[in-house]
Image (spheres, helix red, strand yellow):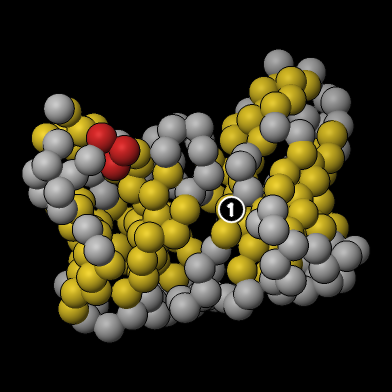
Amino acid sequence: GQNIDQPTEMTATEGAIVQINCTYQTSGFNGLFWYQQHAGEAPTFLSYNVLDGLEEKGRFSSFLSRSKGYSYLLLKELQMKDSASYLCAATDSNYQLIWGAGTKLIIKP
Amino acid sequence: NAGVTQTPKFRVLKTGQSMTLLCAQDMNHEYMYWYRQDPGMGLRLIHYSVGEGTTAKGEVPDGYNVSRLKKQNFLLGLESAAPSQTSVYFCASSQGQGIYNEQFFGPGTRLTVL
C-alpha cells in the first residue's frame, strides 16, 4: 500500500533548530515535496527532493534517503512565524502526490 | 497576477442540496486538481485535469463531478450533498505533473453539510 507518516505535533523554541521527519511508501516514487500550511490558509511550496542528499534554501533544508524511504525538513533559527503545519508529499506511479497528515509545529518564545 | 482563486470561501448546505465550487487560475497551467482536507488526514485528491476538456478520477471521486471547459477554470460539483462531504476543499494547479512541478493552491472553500 501507499503511506506517508510524519509526527502529529512538535514543539520548539524560538531561535532553535527543529527536524521534522517523514517516512514514505509509494509505488513508482520519483520525488518528495515539503509544503507549509498556516492555520486557515492554503499550503505553500517549500522544497522538493529527487536525489539522495540535502537541499538547502535559506533557513530551511530538506533531506532525502531513497533507500530508506525517509526524508526530513530542517528549520534553523526558528521564528514565531514558522508556527504552522508542515506537509510531506511523495509522488506515486501516476505522478500524483500522496500526502501526509502534516506536522503541526508550535514555536514557543 | 492573482494565482489560484476559489469561490465561495464558505458555504453551508443542507443534506441533499447541490452546489458548484469554482476554481480559476491565471498562470496558464495545464494541470488542475481538487483536493479535500479533513482533520488528521492528508490532502486527498478528488479529481484532476491534465488539460482543457479532460478530467480524471482521483482517490476519492464518489459524490463529486468536475468539468474543465476552459483552461483557466476547474469546477467541482456536488449533486446531492451529504454530511460526509463536510470538509475544506482546495483547488491547485501546476504546469506539469509529478516532481519538478510544484502545485499552487487556492485559499480553500470551507463547506459544512448539515
Crowding near the residue tagged with mark 1, few <14, some 14–19, many ≥20 C-alpha atoms within 10 Å: many
Chain letter for the residue marked with disc 1 in the picture: B
Instruction: Decide which of B33, B17 is in the foreground and name it.
Output: B33
Task: Name the residue rendered at 18%, 78% in the picture.
Answer: A53
- Location of residue A93 in the rendering, given as x and y in whole percent from the top left corner: 48, 77
- Above or below, comparing residue B69 to residue A86 in the picture: below
Task: Name the residue rendered at 74%, 20% in the picture.
Answer: B12
Task: Name the residue rendered at 47%, 53% in the picture.
Answer: A44
Callout 1, which amino acid? Phe
- Location of residue B57 in the rendering, given as x and y in whole percent from the top left corner: 69, 61
Any part of residue A28 in sight:
yes
The answer to which image quadrant residue B9 occupies is top right
The answer to which image quadrant residue B58 occupies is bottom right
Please state, as top left, top right, bottom left or bottom right, where the N terminus of chain A lies in the image.
bottom left
Q: Residue furthest right?
A: B69
- Location of residue B26 in the rendering, given as x and y in whole percent from the top left corner: 74, 62
Any part of residue B64 in sight:
no
Local secondary structure at mark 1:
strand
The answer to which image quadrant residue B96 occupies is bottom right
Instruction: Decide which of A32, B71 is in the foreground and name it.
Output: B71
- State the residue position of label 1: B105
- Location of residue B43 in the rendering, given as x and y in whole percent from the top left corner: 50, 48
Please state, as top left, top right, bottom left or bottom right, where the C terminus of chain A lies in the image.
top left
- Above or below, comparing residue A91 to residue B3 in the picture: below
Task: Name the residue rendered at 16%, 28% in the picture.
Answer: A108
